[in-house]
Amino acid sequence: MKKFVIEREKLAENARLIQKKAGVPVIAVLKADGYGFGMAQMAQVLAETGIRMFAVTEPEDALRLRELGFAEQEILVMRSTALADEVYQVIQANAIATVGSPEAAYCLNEVAQGCGTQARAHLKLDTGMGRYGFLPDQYGELKAVCTDCAGIRVTGIYTHFHSAFADEAATRAQYKTLCEIAARLRADGIDCGLRHAANSSGLFCYDDLTLDAVRIGSAFTGRIPAKTPTGLNRLGYLESRVIELRTVPKGHTVGYGAGYVTPGATRIAVVPVGYTDGFSVEKKRDLYRLRDVVRYNIGEIKNGLGRGAIYITVNGQRARVLGHVGLCHVSVDVTGLDVKNGDTAILDVNPLYLSPLVPKEYV
Ligand SMILES: *Cc1c(COP(=O)(O)O)cnc(C)c1O
């Protein structure tokens, strides 16, 4: 038995805190199945807190949100695409396209006109992310989308911060570029609508980058890199049970590679959760800064030496994982703790790496 538990009220609290802090409309980013929390349920809770605009990366997700009954909300598809079938889905979903290149604009314009409609689009600027977006020196092409494409109605312009959590100078430079281009369009008589840049770290690490809207994803889950406390609830935990208790003598080895040797008689609880479920697999992938990589690797070395440790919670008490995490099991030290078979075990898992086989339960 295992399940990933998500507390609805904690998510709603986060959503309310974010909207209050932003003070401008919040575009709720639901990519990657709502950051692993389930797009449909997350959208439902967020809509109930007053969120009126969603963003996804996949055109299919925009269609799915409509099928789920989210008819009132605006949906921004953040992936600029020059593929006609994808653009067609965006239009079918009555979503807002992202236009990040002349090719994407051309494609959207053609398909929209073919459908006898005018597609709404937000322009995307590449100010350093290097994936979607017009480069700042493509001003002429950018302007042409607004003036020459009868099948496109531009209702917004945005860019994406690459280092809001770490590099203030770079973030402010990206912000400035967006503002300058929007102002230049305005001076040329073009109102490109909603300007937005801030992601979760952009909102929580700075007070003045909110513009006309913010695009927030990970902050809803309470899992963002920020130096100061955010007041957000950390959302979601993996729940399982103790299925076996045993005591092994001093000098006994635990786990593959005999990675742990007991220093004395040790009471072990077995919990049937392992890295197949996503437990203890993610850390390295979350690291962007050299100092974090160094810290992580030192931790790994300590782990290899039998120091450094992973803890889970068993019957409300902290218990250390012994040896290497297995594919389907962990062994934890419950020596001296009040633990019996069937007791609840709580494990911290990054839901982005949670196995899709583990059911999610909103409570
Ligand atoms: C993922 C994403 C966001 C949300 O980022 P968070 O840091 O999770 O809030 C915003 N904008 C774009 C373009 C994204 O890809």
Image (cartoon, helix red, strand yellow):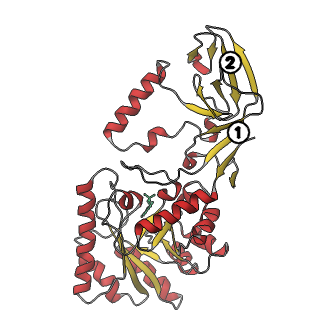
Q: Which mark is residue 240?
A: 1
> Residue placed at 58% from the left, 22% from the top?
323
> Residue placed at 41% from the left, 72% from the top?
23
User: Which quadrant of the figure has residue 155?
Assistant: bottom left
Which image quadrant: the N terminus?
A: top right
Between the C-alphas of marks 1 and 2, the distance is 19 Å
> Residue placed at 27% from the left, 52% from the top?
167
The residue lying toward the viewer, choosing from 264 and 13, is: 13
Quick check: can you spot residue 295? Answer: yes
| Three-letter amino acid code at the position of disc 1 | Ser
Vertical side of 174 occupied by 295: above or below: above
Q: Residues within 10 Å of mark 1 (few under 14, many from 20)?
A: many
| Whole-percent x, y for residue 87 in the image | 50, 76
| Whole-percent x, y for residue 237 in the image | 61, 45
Q: Quadrant of ligand 1?
A: bottom left
Whether the residue carrying mark 2 lies under 8 Å from ligand 1 is answered with no
Q: Which mark is residue 267?
A: 2
The residue lying toward the viewer, choosing from 111 and 231, is: 231
Vertical side of 342 occupied by 262: above or below: above
Q: Which is nearer the N-term, disc 1 or disc 2?
A: 1
Q: Residues within 10 Å of mark 2 (few under 14, many from 20)?
A: some
Whether the residue carrying mark 1 lies under 8 Å from ligand 1 is answered with no
User: Which quadrant of the figure has residue 194?
Assistant: bottom left
Judge left or right: residue 356 versus residue 18: right
| Whole-percent x, y for residue 329 in the image | 67, 30
Which type of secondary structure does the marked residue at label 2 adopt? strand
- Tags 1 and 2 touching, CB below 8 Å: no
Marks 1 and 2: which is nearer the front?
2
Quick check: can you spot residue 57? Answer: no
| Three-letter amino acid code at the position of disc 2 | Arg
The residue lying toward the viewer, choosing from 111 and 21, is: 21
